[in-house]
Amino acid sequence: MQHEIESKFLDFARARAVGDDVGVAVRSGRFSALPNQAAPDLFGSVDMLYAAHILGKLDEISDAAGRAAWLEHILSYQDEDGWFRSRDKQSHGVEHATAYALGGLQILAGQNGDMLARGMKPLRGLQSEIAREPGRSIAPFDLTLLDRVHFWRGSHRVGGLAAIVGTIDELGLSGERFLGIASPRDWLDGWWAYFAERVEAPTGYWTMAPLPLQMAFDTLYRFRHNPKLASMGGAVHLYWVSEKMRAPMPHPRALIPATIDLMEPTGLYENEPYCIDLDGNFLIGRALSYLEPDHELEATAREALAVNRDAVLTWFASRPHDAWKPNSHALPGALAAVAEADRTLMNGSPPRWRDIFETTWWL
């Protein structure tokens, strides 16, 4: 099935390439998130880059000159305040867009931060948002009431800002110049100290709003999504970063059953695969790595990963590429869900698809 999906992906990508010469557009990263658009956009470009990287297809669709052009194309979406913006009709926040763009740049540049230092602007908008020395009782930045009560939404900012800091640090770029902080790692430690103090022990997730307000919001939110699923989707954005930091997971034993309980009978977390499947597999697999071998939860956790993996692969393999979700932003997370499951299930054997978090801090 994986061979078949890789082949279909190439057709999916070509359908979103923007330009008179499709081959040139694909090679240089000119994609739109939706097919048949007049102009490329940031999310289309980075979605296709992530997907190709996960599938091991980047060398097949681009070359050194193409990657350099792709890198410059992504940098063109950075505004004078330092934030990256997609310039299409999607409503992604600047923190998410910037963290995602930096992940794409990291794929293209590898660990060569000098490639970015010459062309990237300081992140002045971020500098105005963050506290210089966060800690257990000092928030790294302000959260709006909506960010707190709708934490799935707010977590894109909570995790996105930290992922930006982590990426800049990992690339060896000047924290003082790009972030306005002397030690990005110290800032990250303070960020995690603040949020790790607020994890709920029964689930390993977060509730950041007063309980009566949260309950009222959840009652209304049920008409759109399962509120518990939203809590899981919010939590994982923080764990992506804390795992990159190699910070201990506070409640791994609780995360596994809380997350498995959210899986649908189909093996997916909703009707169609997207990043929520990565979120579930990430929490289950990473939490399991904290437990002793042959722990009572191991068999259950591994079974859940295998069931979701097979459900994702079957969904994509059983449909032509033009019947996949039309917005390309659903694709990288769904593919990463398979790689994340294999990370645990392959027992040390090289997985077919690449773990995106070996390279980036954000998806």
Image: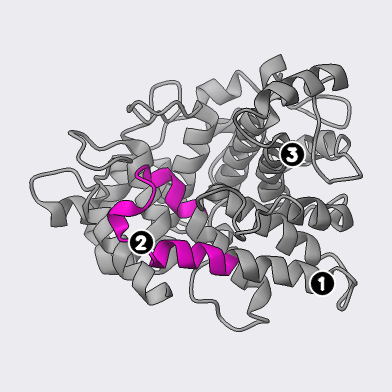
Which residue does the numbered mark 3 point to in the structure image?
Answer: 228
Amino acid type, callout 3 = Lys
Which color mode does the image show?
A: one colour
Secondary structure of the residue carrying numbered label 2: loop
Q: Earlier in the sequence, mark 3 or mark 1?
A: 3
Q: Can residue 248 be seen in the rendering of this structure? A: no
Task: Say above or below: 48 vs 192.
Answer: below
Classified by dominant secondary structure, the portion drawn in magenta counts as helix
Left or right: residue 107 compared with residue 31: right
> Which quadrant: the N terminus?
bottom left
Q: Nearer the viewer, residue 174 or 350?
A: 350
Amino acid type, callout 2 = Arg
Which residue does the numbered mark 2 point to in the structure image?
Answer: 319
Q: Residue at x 79, y 22 (%)?
A: 214
**For the residues bearing labels 3 and 1, Cβ distance under 8 angstroms:** no
Which residue does the numbered mark 1 point to in the structure image?
Answer: 298
Highlighted range, magenta:
309-333
